[in-house]
Amino acid sequence: MADPMKKRMISACNTWLLICFCCTLLTGCWDRIEINDLAIVLATGVDYKNDQIELTSQIFIPRKAGGGDSTGSGGSPSGVTLTRSAEGHTIAEALNRLQRKVPRNMFWGHCEVIVISEDAGKKGIREFIDFFLRYPQIREHAYVFSTPDPAKNILALLDPLERSSAESLREMANMKLGTRITVLELAQSIEGPNQSVILSRMLTLAPDEGQDKLTTTPYIKGLSLYKGDRFNRSVQEPLTVGILMLANELNNIIMPVNVEPERGSFSIQPLEVKTILKPKISGSQWSMQVDVQARGEVLLNTTNGDLTDPAVLKKLEETWASQLKDMAESALRLSQREMRTDLFKFAVEFRRYYPKQWKEQEKRWEQIYSELDVDIQIHAQVVRTGKSAGPQGIPDEQGR
């Protein structure tokens, strides 16, 4: 009896010794950082000022997030953010100086928006991209925007509707009001075969009368076009429609269509615009077939035309298709003749379908693209005419 009891006691002792030894190896939470010690960054802005890079962060203020009396002007839920800026010869140096102006450890894991000013874009954004992708805390899926104004002014806005201007920009990107480009996609576009990028261009809406100049919201107007890593130019409507259509990013837009000889116009909202690229190499001749399939609905009819008449509907579809083709051809001329830059990722398709020929001619792509034969075909269909059949306000019988 003594031997089994002795064995159990030895086994129990060994078990306790093993547990005690394992406990000495546990690190615990000695290196933890409390949330109260963090400054949570919601958005980042990059400017170029005094021959230096200016980095701006929009920081969340947690103590105001749930307060009922901490609203901004006019009952706005804004005012829960603050901005801090710092300059440096490099963006990393600017970050180091920026941290010195914030009494908490800056945490970039919630940074969902990056705004780059056009002045900074003219100097080249390759350094910024390298930093945003290399720095471990910054999300590679943060949305990127461009602005002709200082980026820090966009981040300083107190949006009357949203909790911060960062949230406004994120919502606009999700609504696809322009292009929706992430940091990773930006890097892939600039370093990829097409070496270009299209960014949504942000402006500041004028504040309501009697409101503070910051109590307003950013909005999208136009596009910023980059050749390589440098800002080249900005464009406005209707040219932006053609650019977005060829880039397969045309969404959330209403287009007026004038059908002759009718007076007035139809307003069409595209439900789906799909662009299909079909590259072709025949001998030494490179060409691209662009097929655009558009489906839309009529939101407004200020003409006397009755869309229940098949002839009127067909004429509307033909006119809409012709208008879309004119816009696409204008965008193509800008890209091929003026910028000599592949904005629409034609190079990606040639590399995919003709890898051998692409490898041989890759260095000549700018010249090939500027001389590329491009055939654009538009197939437009009106699939909905609205709840009303004929034009409203027109009597059924003349003289009534």
Image (cartoon, rainbow, N blue to C red):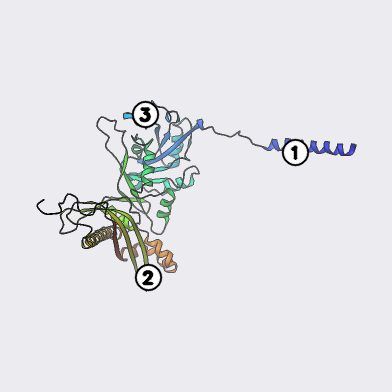
The percent coordinates of residue 286 (x first, y second) are 35, 69
Give the quadrant of residue 63: top left
Instruction: Please state which of the two labelled residues, at mark 1 or mark 2, is closer to the viewer.
Output: 1
> Could you tell which of marks 2 and 3 lies nearer the N-terminus?
3
> Could you tell which of marks 3 and 1 lies nearer the N-terminus?
1
The percent coordinates of residue 282 (x first, y second) are 36, 73
Q: How many residues crowd around disc 1 within 10 Å: few (fewer than 14), some, or many (20 or more)? A: few
Q: CA distance from mark 3 to mark 1?
A: 57 Å
State the residue at coordinates (34%, 68%).
Answer: 287
Q: What residue is pinned by disc 1?
A: 18
Residue type pointed to by label 1: Leu
Towards the viewer: 272 or 384: 384
Element assignment for label 2: strand
Q: CA distance from mark 2 to mark 3?
A: 61 Å
**Where 242 falls versus 31 (above or below)?**
below
Residue type pointed to by label 2: Ile
Instruction: Please state which of the two labelled residues, at mark 3 or mark 1, is closer to the viewer.
Output: 3
State the residue at coordinates (38%, 43%).
Answer: 171
Residue 281, label in figure:
2
Give the quadrant of residue 157: top left
Residue 71, label in figure:
3
State the residue at coordinates (26%, 37%).
Answer: 206
